[in-house]
Image (cartoon, rainbow, N blue to C red):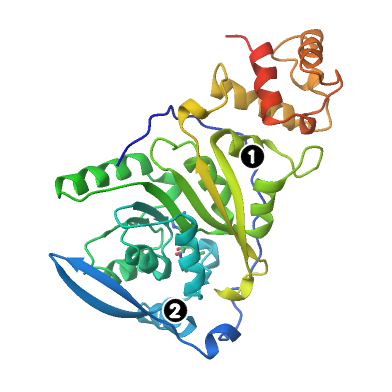
Amino acid sequence: MEIRTMSPSSLSNLPTLPSMSFNHRQKPQPPAHTSSRRRMLYISCAEGGSRTKRPTTDDYHGTLRALNSKGRFPRKSLGQHYMLNSDINEQLAGVAAVEEGDVVLEIGPGTGSLTNVLLNSGAFVLAVEKDKHMAALVSERFSSTGKLKILTEDILKCHVRSHMLSLVESLKQMDHETRNAKVVANIPFNISTDVIKQLLPMGDIFSEVVLLLQEETALRLVESSLRTSEYRPINIFVNFYSDPEYKFKVPRTHFFPQPNVDAAVVSFKLKLQTEYPKVLSSKSFFSMVNSGFNEKRKMLRKSLQHICTSSEIEEALTSLGLPVTARPEELTLDDFVKLHNLIAKE
Ligand SMILES: C[S@@+](CC[C@H](N)C(=O)[O-])C[C@H]1O[C@@H](n2cnc3c(N)ncnc32)[C@H](O)[C@@H]1O
């Protein structure tokens, strides 16, 4: 696997996107789509040349059985909404074109329904699960594959880079051919902004990040237009580090327990460092973007006065063909980059 080169940067001051509300006390009801069919999936375990077929179920009943086996009930604090439709897991893996030899980071494997599909596609999986009971469940479920490494950790505190590099290194030593590294995950909606901030600058490690997000978040990240209240620093950040694409909607009925909102799949194709917009310093660039948006109704010639004088800002805006009264929501990523390079002091 090629590890791409980049310099890590961070954006500390981004607003948190809204989290969803959900009802974890609802009485479990089998969703309509699972009542008539129970998909039996078979995972191929190719180890030492032998091939075994292991039946697994990842529908409503399978999920309940898996939870019962550990005496667990979904925890709201951990955003535990389990995917009941294996077709959607297949489509998630399909969006990332997961194939034999890929190394996939999965965040929050839960009962392992997506893990199953990823392993079945021939990937090596590094799964990070905060809930120790679910980590134990997934670890037991796939122990025979030899292709899953599970870390019982909070993804937001996890040293993803070093774990990925050491996994790839150990796979190399075992003579495994590895190809691309990707992220494919159905993550808790309430940590999605933090996960995005953590992963998108890792274009040297991952070629693509495919996430199942709250639909409203997905739309805000990918489709927010200039001059709307949805246009925020996170949009500048996402487009700085990646090419995002909204893939498809996932209705709430496919999860247990059912959330109060729908979900959607987004793919972020990560840029290499050489493809990032050229800024003097990404830290001071994002600090300028955040300052501009801190007081959204303020004109940039006022909100950026800590960087230079308002007449210097006006001059820079004019040279970019923007009005001297421009507000942050009127500037594209490219405008912000040019403005930064004109007014930022080295
Ligand atoms: C939305 S569920 C998805 C479960 C499974 N991937 C599926 O599709 O059914 C989110 C999973 O993330 C786990 N989780 C929650 N917070 C986490 C964190 N900070 N780090 C790692 N895993 C976390 C939860 O325990 C849960 O298993």
**CA–CA distance in space, label 1 to label 2:** 34 Å
Residue hosting label 2: 63
Q: Please identify the residue farthest to the left as the structure is shown.
A: 48
The residue sitting at 78% across, 33% down in the picture is 329
Quadrant holding the C terminus: top right
- In the rendered view, does 33 fall on the left or right side of 215? left
Which quarter of the picture shows residue 30? bottom right
Bin the neighbour count of mark 1 within 10 Å (Cα to Cα): few under 14, some 14-19, many 20 and up: many
Q: Earlier in the sequence, mark 1 or mark 2?
A: 2
Residue 1 as seen in the image, left or right of residue 219: left
Q: Secondary structure at mark 2?
A: helix
* Quadrant of the image containing the N terminus: top left
- Place of residue 5 in the rendered image (x, y in percent of width and height, measured from the top left): 38, 29
Element assignment for label 1: helix
Residue 182 screen position, x and y as percent: 41, 49
Work out whether residue 284 can be spotted.
yes
Q: Could you tell me the amino acid type at mark 1?
A: Ile
Q: Nearer the viewer, residue 145 or 70?
A: 145
Judged left or right of residue 232, residue 64 is left
Q: Is residue 69 above or below residue 36?
A: above
Residue depicted at 55% across the width and 66% down the height: 76
Tell me, yes or no, if residue 256 can be seen here. Answer: no
Q: Give the amino acid type for the residue marked by disc 2 in the picture.
A: Thr
The quadrant holding residue 14 is: top right
Label 2 residue near ligand 1, CB within 8 Å? yes
Of residues 100 and 324, the one nearer the viewer is: 100
Who's the residue at 61% across and 34% down the image? 13
Q: Residue at x 80, y 10 (%)?
A: 315
Disc 2 crowd, CA 10 A, few/some/many (<14, 14-19, 20+): many
The correct choice, above or below, for 103 with respect to 146 in the image is above
Which disc number belongs to residue 234? 1
